[in-house]
Amino acid sequence: MSRTPQEIFESHVYAGAVTRNADALAENFTVDGVFEAPLMPAGAAFPRRLVGREEIRVGMAAYYEQQAKDVRSPNLEKSRYVLHTTADPDVFIAEIDTVFDGDGDGGDVAVSLVQIFRIREGKIARLRDYFAPELMS
């Protein structure tokens, strides 16, 4: 069954940023899927490159476990995104402004990023996630 870019994107965000469910996140990818964060420095807590559904599952589970003390979740009412389709029907781009509620010490924290999705048979074959690395520390 083929899913729309909207459905794929929403499933990815819910599994990752909202629920931090590495199993559900990995299931959004093809068996040989690639999840990349090209701007991350080597050795960072957030994985720079994960290849294959199982490596994505294990790598993101480890990251989510490390981040368990960070209870911030995105404020979905304040956050915004725009999906851009391309000439290639298997590629779409997500332009995202995620807002995290302030922790009492200050105002909201906004994180802007761009994700490029390459899809195969309704699953993510490759995802490139571009964001400022210091936001993930």
Image (tube, helix red, strand yellow):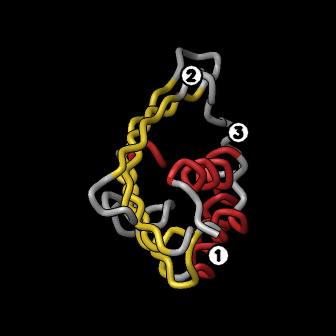
Residue at position x 49%, y 29% in the image:
80
Q: Do the CB atoms of the residues marked 2 and 1 lie less than 8 Å apart?
A: no
Along the line of sight, the residue nearer the viewer: 48 or 24: 24
At label 3, which amino acid type do we have? Answer: Val
**Residue indicated by mark 1:** 58
Q: CA distance from mark 3 to mark 1?
A: 21 Å
Mark 3, residue position: 71
Image-quadrant location for residue 122: bottom right
Q: Amino acid at mark 1?
A: Val
Residue 112, given in percent of the width and then of the height, sits at 39, 36
* Secondary-structure class at tag 2: loop
Amino acid type assigned to the residue bearing label 2 in the image: Lys
Q: Secondary structure at mark 3?
A: loop
Residue at horizontal 64%, vertical 73%? 57
Mark 3 or mark 1, earlier in chain: 1
**Mark-to-mark CA distance, 3 and 2:** 17 Å
**Is 4 rendered above or below residue 69?**
below
Q: Is residue 119 above or below residue 76?
A: below
- The kind of secondary structure element at disc 1 is helix
Where 68 sits versus 59, above or below?
above
Marks 3,2: beta carbons within 8 A: no
Please name which of the two marks, 3 or 2, marks the residue nearer to the observer: 2
Q: CA distance from mark 2 to mark 1?
A: 31 Å
Residue 110 in the image: state x and y as whole percent.
Answer: 46, 28
Q: Which residue is mark 2?
A: 78
Q: Residue at x 67, y 48 (%)?
A: 14
- Relative vertical location of residue 104 with respect to residue 15 in this rendering, above or below: above
